[in-house]
């Protein structure tokens, strides 16, 4: 194999490794995003349940404290 072919092969190998690392980073970022969204959806559901309960109680107790969003 000539020196030029060897250099090209090494450059292609380095580029493929870089692309694999980038793809792995994107996959992990996607998993983190899915986890964050799941947590947000769970918080929204929890707030909805508490707000609905407050509205039902509020009809009986007009000065009931408002439900607060839970801060994580």
Image (cartoon, helix red, strand yellow):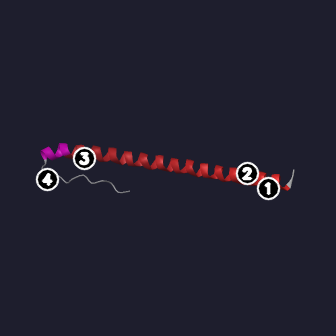
Where residue 34 sits in the image (x, y, percent)?
A: 47, 46
Looking at the image, which residue sits at the far right?
Answer: 1
Number of the front mark, 2 or 3: 2
Residue 63: image tag = 4
Q: CA distance from mark 1 to mark 4?
A: 77 Å
Name the residue that disc number 2 marks: 12
Instruction: Kindly identify the residue that appears in the image at 30 percent across and 53 percent down.
Output: 69
**In 3D space, how far apart are the residues under numbered discs 2 and 3 (Cα atoms)?**
58 Å
Residue span colored magenta: 55-60
Q: Earlier in the sequence, mark 3 or mark 1?
A: 1
Q: CA distance from mark 3 to mark 4?
A: 14 Å
Q: Please tell me which residue is depicted at 38% across the width and 45% down the height of the picture.
A: 41
Q: Position of residue 30 (x, y in %)?
A: 51, 48
The image shows residue 14 at horizontal and vertical percentages of: 72, 54
Mark found first going from the N terminus, 2 or 3: 2
Name the mark on residue 7.
1
Comes first in the chain, label 1 or label 4:
1
Residue at image coords 33%, 44%: 45
Asked if labels 1 and 3 touch by Cβ distance under 8 angstroms, the answer is no
Residue at disc 1, secondary structure: helix
Callout 4 secondary element: loop
Label 3: which residue?
A: 51
Residue 55 left/right relative to 11: left
For marks 2 and 4, give the one nearer the viewer. Answer: 2
Comes first in the chain, label 3 or label 4 = 3
Left or right of residue 58: residue 16: right
Q: Position of residue 10 (x, y in %)?
A: 77, 54
Label 3 – label 1 distance at C-alpha: 65 Å
Q: Is residue 50 left or right of residue 24?
A: left
Q: Main secondary structure of the magenta part?
A: helix
């Amino acid at each position: 194999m000539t020196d030029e072919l060897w250099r090209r092969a090494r450059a292609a190998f380095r580029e493929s490794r870089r692309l694999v690392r980038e793809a792995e980073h994107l996959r992990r970022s996607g998993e983190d995003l899915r986890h964050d969204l799941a947590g947000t959806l769970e918080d929204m559901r929890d707030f909805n349940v508490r707000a609905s309960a407050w509205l039902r109680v509020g009809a009986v107790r007009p000065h009931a404290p408002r439900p607060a969003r839970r801060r994580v």
